């Protein structure tokens, strides 16, 4: 049907006859001839129709944007002055001999080059949106990323194994999507939140090195950039420790970035490793963006003795913290900008945003401009200046509150200020975050939660050592989890797993999961662990987010072919949709009276 | 943790120290030393422990089958006479220096080399079953098949695009698995029966060449070898005709078979093509197994005049058929065997199974042994013998009934007899079946159904030509569908699709889908077709069945890591399972009173 895709017609085909197919991107009449830019997935080619060929010319007059054409013509050089160096086909044009209208098109709901189309319209007419070169590139980049990841893993001895989609509720904390069973009245399958337990079972089955590009599901209230279904590169290895898996994954990512973006990820070195404690202390985040040079400075010990209660109290409280964020050159921030940041940190629970502008440090307190300077003795101010390393022209922001609030607020402020002041390095800055706490205390439920998941191994080498740690403070027990962070996004995370049934039982105990519940939910895992489970561990990468980062898209919706809206609807197909009474009967279900209105 | 996998320790490591991990496959005490065969995914290696190293020996005494060990030792040649040429490691053994018990194992519920384990036990303890070399090989072969298919397609310019799992009911005829929505009370997603409409939308979006290894779902009553979820290699191309897609797919399969099985599929030639009509006439099946030399012979015209009503009536009926199946050498079949075949064809609706044994054809009717010979004039018998090509020693089976019954019964009998008489060639015999009828009449519902699906293009080139055909006889209208058949299994099927909205509307009309229903169900497709849909077509291959064929497994369950039973349960995780009242509330659902008992 075609000899060439549109974008491949170049000087090389000069004077030869080519046939190509595509969509009418633009049609213009100019000087008695008709110009058509025909578009396919490879690009555009310009075709000229002149009235000499009457029948063909008549067809050409008839076409409108987005008509689907098959054109045969002869390649010739464009007239001087009309060459377009930005196009692969920019040196040539095709003199059209034959034109076949393969399909007509109604006037599209939006122009492809209109950059102000609402996302609603883009999703409703995704098949038109997708014709835009930008969307084509993203979907193609995604395919290349996944392809490259597969190759790297396969070359490394991993095999892909498919795990079930219709499965049992997984214990990942989020809400499951459920699937009613027709054969088993009152019972439901769950769609997997991840293949976690299955991949561990595969290790027990001797698969040794597993991977899967796995669809995962979470029925959560969708925040800004979540989707009910997402894709995970899921990986598990047997007979390994952290070192092996981390270096394997690092290599995989290095090859990926080299191949797809021609970037030397890590600059030829191993990715740096940072403990969770350091990440929180210095960056206020467990996924620090290392492109930003700002860091938090611990100040609690300097201010615990001052009269200013707003600082002294959190400084003295073991669960509180006072920290500074030095902003080089931040002196130039206006009152209005600082007010904006104050409002910004308020979203993270901060009750205010103290600051000091360093006008002339040598002058002592006189040289500092701030509503709070008056509360501090000069030597405290000097110590703060010294420890933060502030220079004339800098500004120091302060956080003083519960540790979690200070870290969330200053951690977010760090990024916000850096963007504002254009301090984000144009680079790829990967790292590993390690030594995570195993549990975190849920203040509302008054119980311990697993920070990763209940199958993560503790750093303790024996159950006895672990018990001693637990007796001291469960909050200080470390796990063998690791996250790969890139430019402030967690792109992957995993852990060495528990492979002993006693240890697994104990982890469930600590989480307040009693034996009955443990048996109900994870009985098969606890049983499997008894029959010879190898030491194993793994990791999962969020493909959507990774691709989004790699192609600089703003939303994961832009790297998915058919994403859903925030209310989890598909605007194109109108899913979800009502079903018949008979279908409900088949599934042994009845609708409840509508207590709530649908939100869309 | 290890220097080598078990199966890689060979002569090459002679005299060097190696460390390896795995499961205890066998332990035996012999002549004061302990032999352990350690197993991992690559194979077995024999390790010898002698009492000189007391501590290690004590550990070795302690181990039982399926314990997980890490062993360090020195590679040495096996004593003469104990070399095992069937194992890659059969020339060597390892003298064990150190033994670490990585994990203990309870006595497994079955021995790995026990070939009589019930499938129930195999599925319940899949992680143990999977350690068996046979299951390892199957899962690894599957991974290799999928890998090779991906490579072939990617090298050919196809890109993988992921389509949604939470989607709208697809119109494939089978029952959908439904997923209740929390955000939209009373509404449901459907899990895809195939990505059919999405892949067509991708073509309209300009993706040009799409593929996906896609999970598909059908909530059907599970027959012998079906699974509620299965994997499909889904493919679609734009601007192509049958020729292009068929040759592309043929090449893909040839490369696959060459790479994975070292088989020249098609023997260097294009796959043969057979019309649906020929396939039914000659093989009684739309997926003929060409490894079997038997064919059906049309006899209706020869017997329509005889007095024997059992033959004459179906012969005269336009919807009836009389056919013969010559079985070379079939004379030797016993009465009992023939009775068995009679019962067999009964399952396909045949009311009996007439036959003639050709003892001595030259003698005329005298030389033929059969209860029915007496009903036929000698010249009819001679014509039957001649047309079937029967020789002395052969047997001819007859089918005389409705065409559909004759074809189903003789088609199945053909295979059954060939297996019994060992007439199935040991070969790979692919072919394309083409020229399918577009519609088939459903006698129960008294309406036309799409033989493939409602998006398949008719062979007619214009809507007018098509209308003329439809007016004559919808049953005779051909579609542009094609199936790839291999050794009697349909491994892939597809079609050129309708790309005009008028034609699509008309196809839905013929199927009795009124405008309202069409808009409700496929409104988005009909709309999309208006905005410039390219000519396109595609195909889908059933990965599970293909892999099953390639590795000679008996069931698709044997090529899936975690398959479900016939009642769609997972014996390992116990899915599906009851959910909490709160979960039901969240989904706006209530259980119906149990009208039926669960079937498991």
Image (cartoon, coloured by chain):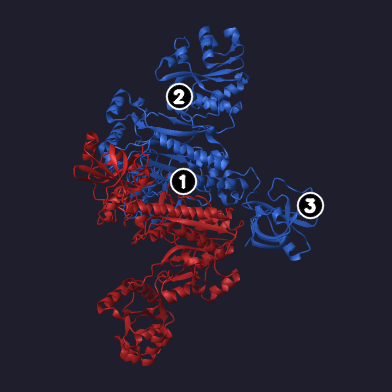
Chain colours: A red, B blue
At x 24% / y 50%, what residue is drawn? A110
- In the picture of the structure, the residue carrying the numbered disc 2 is B278
Q: Nearer the viewer, residue B598 or A584?
A: A584
The vertical placement of B19 against B446, above or below, is: below
Is residue A520 something that shows in the picture? no
The vertical placement of B476 against A82, above or below, is: above
Q: CA distance from mark 2 to mark 3?
A: 64 Å
Q: CA distance from mark 1 to mark 3?
A: 50 Å
Q: Nearer the viewer, residue B283 or B145?
A: B145
Q: Position of residue A477 (x, y in %)?
A: 52, 72
Q: In this rendering, would A280 be left or right of B239?
A: right
The vertical placement of A461 against A141, above or below, is: below
Quadrant position of the N terminus of chain A in the picture: top left
The answer to whether dots 1 and 3 both sit on one chain is: yes
- In the picture of the structure, the residue carrying the numbered disc 1 is B155
In primary-sequence order, the first of circles 2 and 3 is 3
């Amino acid at each position: 049907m075609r000899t060439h895709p549109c974008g491949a017609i170049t000087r090389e085909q000069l004077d030869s006859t080519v046939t190509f197919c595509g969509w009418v991107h633009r049609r213009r009449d100019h000087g008695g001839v008709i110009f058509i830019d025909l578009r396919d997935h490879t690009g555009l080619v310009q075709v000229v129709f002149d009235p000499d060929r009457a029948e063909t010319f008549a067809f050409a007059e008839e076409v409108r944007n987005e008509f689907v054409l098959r054109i045969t013509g002869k390649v010739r050089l464009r007239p001087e002055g009309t060459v377009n160096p930005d196009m692969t086909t920019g040196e040539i044009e095709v003199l059209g001999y034959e034109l076949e209208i393969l399909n007509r098109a109604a006037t599209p709901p939006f122009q492809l080059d209109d950059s102000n189309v609402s996302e609603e319209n883009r999703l409703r007419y995704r098949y038109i949106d997708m014709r835009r070169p930008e969307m084509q590139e993203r979907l193609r980049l995604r395919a290349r990323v996944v392809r490259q990841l597969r190759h790297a893993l396969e070359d490394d001895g991993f095999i892909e194994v498919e795990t079930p989609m219709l499965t049992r509720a997984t214990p990942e904390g989020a809400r499951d999507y459920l699937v009613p069973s027709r054969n088993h009245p009152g019972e439901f399958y769950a769609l997997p939140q991840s293949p976690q337990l299955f991949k561990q079972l595969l290790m027990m089955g001797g698969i040794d090195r597993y991977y899967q590009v796995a669809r995962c599901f979470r029925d959560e209230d969708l925040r800004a950039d979540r989707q009910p279904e997402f894709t995970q590169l899921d990986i598990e290895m047997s007979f390994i420790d952290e070192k092996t898996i981390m270096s394997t994954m690092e290599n995989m990512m290095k090859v990926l970035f080299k191949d797809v973006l021609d970037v030397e990820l890590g600059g030829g070195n191993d990715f740096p490793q940072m403990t969770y404690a350091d990440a929180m202390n210095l960056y206020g985040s467990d996924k620090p963006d290392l492109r930003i040079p700002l860091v938090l400075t611990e100040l609690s010990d300097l201010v615990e003795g001052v009269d200013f209660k707003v600082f002294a109290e959190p400084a003295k409280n073991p669960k509180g913290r006072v920290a500074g964020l030095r902003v080089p050159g931040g002196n130039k921030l206006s009152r209005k900008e600082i007010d904006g940041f104050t409002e910004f940190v308020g979203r993270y629970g901060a009750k205010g945003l103290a600051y000091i502008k360093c006008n002339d440090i040598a002058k002592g307190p006189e040289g500092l401009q701030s509503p709070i300077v008056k509360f501090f003795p000069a030597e405290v101010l000097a110590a703060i200046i010294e420890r933060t390393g502030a220079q004339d022209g800098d500004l120091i922001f302060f956080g003083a509150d519960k540790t979690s609030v200070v870290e969330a607020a200053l951690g977010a402020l760090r990024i916000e200020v850096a963007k504002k002041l254009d301090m984000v390095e144009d680079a790829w800055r990967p790292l590993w975050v390690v030594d995570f706490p195993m549990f975190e205390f849920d203040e509302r439920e008054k119980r311990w939660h697993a920070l990763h998941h209940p199958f993560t191994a503790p750093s303790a080498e024996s159950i006895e050592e672990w018990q001693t740690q637990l007796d001291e403070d469960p909050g200080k027990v470390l796990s063998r989890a690791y996250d790969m962070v890139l430019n402030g996004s967690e792109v992957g995370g995993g852990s060495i797993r528990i492979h002993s049934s006693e240890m697994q039982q104990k982890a469930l105990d600590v989480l307040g999961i009693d034996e009955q519940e443990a048996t109900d939910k994870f009985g098969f895992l606890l049983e499997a662990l008894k029959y010879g489970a190898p030491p194993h561990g793994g990791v999962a990468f969020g493909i959507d987010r990774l691709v989004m980062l790699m192609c600089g898209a703003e939303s994961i919706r832009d790297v998915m072919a058919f994403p859903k809206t925030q209310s989890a609807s598909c605007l194109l197909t109108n899913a979800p949709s009502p079903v018949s009474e008979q279908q409900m009967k088949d599934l042994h279900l009845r609708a409840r009276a509508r207590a709530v209105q649908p939100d869309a």
